[in-house]
Image: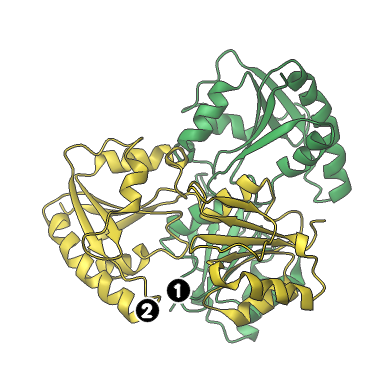
Chain colours: A yellow, B green
């Protein structure tokens, strides 16, 4: 019997936001996989789960996944990681790949899954708390109410969609806004959207955490999200 | 010292998709609140948490929250529930209101929070797994990859936004599509979007669970979501 590859979402970073199911699946797998950006780097995901999940005695595989944002490169990483993982599955070992946030939201697991399916193995996905849900919770904000929609847009990669979202949706989550805060602030002003409709959620759980209104005098890092709610006054 | 009102997301229905934090907060609160649709009805949320959360000896308040979809009615329910809860907070009791899915996504907690803040009490939100993340996991689908966006639209309440999403976004989650499957299927056809780009997720965990392509011969209930991915072939 072949093993199963689990894609396990561990949530946004607070170890307590791991689900009971994620904890159980990880503890029941013999092999754990964590994606890293380059060789020698520590896996953030492992640091997050360690306080609440018992990973003693497990085989740990760290596999490199590019952050290039380039589809063919992701697919290539998926193949390299997939072949390493397939060796374990063939020997009947269950494998858990742990990913930050939720597995369905911008996760590299999906590239790995495509390859693993193509070579005949099974996968199962355990959802996690997406960073934007946790961000909204910390800011005390609803993301969407009643008949409103919600647009989730990677602000650093898809400017036309930032415009569409601002034009047509009541609520938006702009992911990875680090260098785009001024740009989005300008776009809001052009459309007569009050600057107070935006809330920035940056570096959650880190020393320089910031949750508050747009402040153009600040520098924002990679892990910065902006929630814009037109109906918030 | 006044108590705190916690809004606790318990996820989509699988008791194991509750987070460690939700479990801890609920167990540490002396009073639990569950929203019900009408008096005498059982709270679905309580049935979900019972197998994994110890609620023995806690005071249980069931408060009625309309499902009308009408903002003023929600606010009115929030006030009635809020006054009952405030009595507990005043006596230093911590109160947890448990909500299905995530607290920021179409949750009545937000109406309650607005009222509770207005009368001077504190709240804290514990995020949960949204139903659409769990649905995507069950269907084995990514919701969004690379530079793509994701639109979340209540299909039963906002038809213009269904059109916008189909026109401009690569990925869509249409919530509450029960009676709108044919309508959305037609809209996809008009735009040349392949019918296989849609996956229906219906009645998860219930006897009549269905996860699969559009099947117009079926009847779909209230808890039906459709994921449309233009780049899925």
Q: Quadrant of the C terminus of chain A?
A: bottom right
Asked if both marks, 1 and 2, belong to the same chain, the answer given is: no
Give above or below for A149 relative to A98.
below
| Residue A157 placement, left or right of B68 | left
Read off the residue under disc 2: A71
Whether residue B157 is visible here, answered yes or no, is no
Name the chain under label 1.
B
User: Looking at the image, which residue sits at the far top?
Assistant: B57
Residue closer to the observer: B58 or A39 = A39
Contact between labelled residues 2 and 1, with CB atoms less than 8 Å apart: yes
Q: Position of residue A223 (x, y in %)?
A: 49, 60
Name the chain under label 2.
A
Residue closer to the observer: A167 or B12 = A167
User: Looking at the image, which residue sits at the far front?
Assistant: A217
Q: CA distance from mark 1 to mark 2?
A: 7 Å
Q: Secondary structure at mark 1?
A: loop
| Residue A11 placement, left or right of B101 | left
Residue closer to the observer: B168 or A164 = A164
Q: Position of residue B39 (x, y in %)?
A: 78, 28
Q: Quadrant of residue A132?
A: bottom right
Q: Which mark is residue B146?
A: 1
Q: Quadrant of residue B84?
A: top right
| Label 1: how many Cα within 10 Å (few below 14, some 14–19, many 20+) | some
Q: Secondary structure at mark 2?
A: helix
């Amino acid at each position: 019997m072949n093993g199963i590859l689990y894609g396990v979402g561990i949530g946004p970073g607070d170890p307590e936001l791991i689900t009971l199911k994620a904890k159980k699946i990880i503890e029941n797998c013999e092999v754990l996989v964590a994606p890293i950006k380059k060789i020698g780097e520590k896996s953030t995901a492992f640091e997050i789960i360690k306080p609440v999940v018992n990973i003693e005695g497990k085989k740990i595989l760290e596999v490199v996944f590019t952050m290039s944002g380039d589809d063919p490169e992701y697919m290539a990483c998926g193949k390299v990681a997939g072949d390493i993982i397939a060796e374990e599955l063939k020997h009947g070992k269950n494998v858990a790949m742990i990913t930050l946030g939720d597995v369905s939201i911008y996760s590299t697991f999906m590239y790995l899954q495509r390859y693993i399916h193509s070579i005949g193995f099974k996968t199962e996905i355990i959802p996690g708390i997406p960073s934007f849900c946790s961000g909204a919770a910390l800011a005390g904000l609803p993301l969407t109410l009643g008949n409103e929609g919600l647009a989730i847009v990677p602000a650093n990669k898809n400017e036309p969609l930032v415009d569409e979202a601002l034009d047509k949706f009541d609520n938006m989550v702009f992911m990875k806004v680090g260098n785009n805060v001024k740009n989005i602030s300008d776009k809001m002003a052009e459309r007569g959207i009050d600057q107070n409709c935006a809330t920035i959620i940056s570096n959650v759980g880190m020393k320089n955490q910031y949750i508050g209104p747009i402040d153009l005098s600040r520098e924002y890092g990679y892990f910065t999200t902006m929630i814009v709610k037109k109906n918030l006054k």
